Amino acid sequence: MHYVHAKGILSVKNGMNLYRGCSHGCIYCDSRSKCYHMEHDFEDIEIKANAIELLENALKRKRTKCMLGTGSMTDPYIPLESEIGNVRKALLLAEQYGFGFTLITKSSRVLKDLDLLKRINAKTKCVVQMTLTTYNEGLCKKLEPNVSTTRERFEVLKELHNAGIPTVVWLCPILPFINDTEENIMGILNYCIEAKVYGIICFGMGMTLREGSREYFYKQLDQLFPHMKEKYIRTFGSQYELNSPRNSSLMRLFHQICTEKGIVHDNRQIFEYLNTFEEKNNYVQLSLFDEIREK
Ligand code: SF4
């Protein structure tokens, strides 16, 4: 790991990356792509030394409250978070200044912050987004080696629901010829149904590859799935989008099950939900009630 002094922390859409790089080792990771101009090894995590100071200043200056977000480029709950605690500090600031929060993770470490997630959710809105790609635990360990397995993530989703925290699942990427099966999709959907997730984001059954992510992915394929790389090259060449040959039937299944079970599966609607800041009236009422009781 190494430290840098950052110039800013919040993006125009109020997202933040408290770390850069990730040690979870997913073989398909897009964040490795050259277009992100990471000038250090992907596993050598960059820590923004002044991230929390920058965030506090930014929140103090904001005229209107909004949803804050993290996790689109780096999993916020990498093991280093237990040592550095930047995510927890950011959550504390969100709570203190009355902002909503949403984060994307594959790690059960998110539960360490359940107290804060609940407090933010009581005041405004807190949504946890979790990626699920592979129902089979053995296959999951191969594709996403250093992070909670799908079964563990499912347990986390249930615990979050029981704590009143809404959840959204990202069903992606689905790797052609590897986990693009009906059994895999149904396994994940059944987890989502049981964990009562609010919605599932899915852009299609497939994956993307570009310079940087492609080289790493192919190297891992060579080690884990002999001859698969050659099949990918034969089928997709150097395409950016690699759609599963089963895309149509699996997407039909996905939409059908979500419709039947009342899970939101319109990506636009889910993003709108994630971006909409809400203040809880009952929180205000409860606070008033507490004040009256104390008098
Ligand atoms: S958790 Fe996300 S950022 Fe980390 S390696 Fe996996 S895909 Fe990449």
Image (spheres, rainbow, N blue to C red):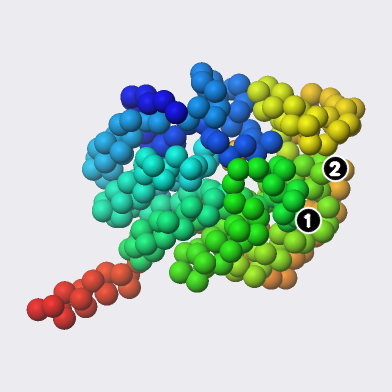
Q: Does the residue labelled 1 lie within 8 Å of ligand 1?
A: no
Q: State the residue position of label 1.
A: 184
Quadrant in the picture for residue 145: top right
Residue 241 picture quarter: top right
Q: Is mark 2 on a helix, strand or loop?
A: loop
Q: Position of residue 274 (x, y in %)?
A: 49, 53
Measured in 3D between alpha carbons, the distance from the residue under mark 2 to the one under mark 1, in whole angstroms, is 12 Å
Residue 67: which numbered mark, if any?
none
Q: Position of residue 152 (x, y in %)?
A: 61, 58
Q: Is residue 63 visible?
A: yes
Q: Is mark 1 on a helix, strand or loop?
A: helix
Percent across and percent down for residue 158 are 56, 67
| Disc 1: CA contacts within 10 A as few (<14), some (14-19) or many (>=20) | some
The residue carrying mark 2 has its beta carbon less than 8 Å from ligand 1: no
Q: Which residue is drawn at 29% across and 48% down?
A: 93
Q: Is 148 in front, or is 239?
A: 148
The quadrant in which the N terminus is found is: top left
Residue in view at x 71 percent, y 59 percent: 188
Please determine whether, in this image, residue 144 is positioned above or below residue 20: below
Instruction: Tell me: 247 left or right of 15.
Output: right
Q: Please report the residue visible at 68 percent of the width from the left and 22 percent of the height from the top.
A: 211
Q: Say few, some or many: other residues with alpha carbon within 10 Å of mark 2 (under 14 / 14 to 19 / 20 or more).
A: some
